[in-house]
Image (tube, rainbow, N blue to C red):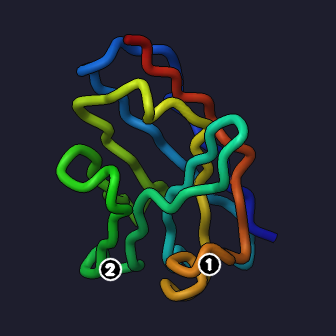
Amino acid sequence: QVQLVESGGGLVQAGGSLRLSCAASGRTFSSGAMGWFRQAPGKEREFVAAISWSGGNIYYGDYVKGRFTISRDNAKNTVYLQMNSLKPEDTAVYYCAADLALSPVLSGIPGFWGQGTQVTVSS
């Protein structure tokens, strides 16, 4: 089983920055592809970003392009989401996702989900 644990969420003012981390563990996990989704109250889950095992293939959701950056450290089995120029509409629970391949993550059906970390951006 793969376990994903997010951290780094919190409260920031609009225009500020925050970095989320997601650490993966488990005997069946071999890095694979990882990504981030978010869900605000009353709204559907939204794709944020995804990254392949090598880091060579990266995708971003339309509303975070130019502001968020996804990266990973395979030696630590950890993926990061650097969030800059945060806006109140970025407020949501952010979930880490993982799978052996990139396509399930991009499709929103990864094999594994984290429990989420709250990000709140005040105006």
Query: In the displayed structure, would residue 38 be above or below residue 92?
Result: below
| Callout 2 secondary element | loop
| Spot occupied by residue 55 in the image (x, y as percentages of width and height) | 30, 74
Location of residue 4 (image quadrant): bottom right
Residue 116 as seen in the image, left or right of residue 68: right
Query: In the displayed structure, would residue 41 be above or below residue 80?
Result: above
Q: Which sits in the foreground, 115 or 45? A: 45
Location of residue 104 (image quadrant): bottom right
Query: In the displayed structure, would residue 38 be above or below residue 54?
Result: above
Does residue 107 appear in the picture of this structure?
A: yes
Amino acid under disc 2: Ser
Quarter holding the N terminus is bottom right
Residue at the spot x=33%, y=71% of the render? 59
Q: Which mark is residue 99?
A: 1
Q: Earlier in the sequence, mark 1 or mark 2?
A: 2
Q: Residues within 10 Å of mark 2 (few under 14, many from 20)?
A: few
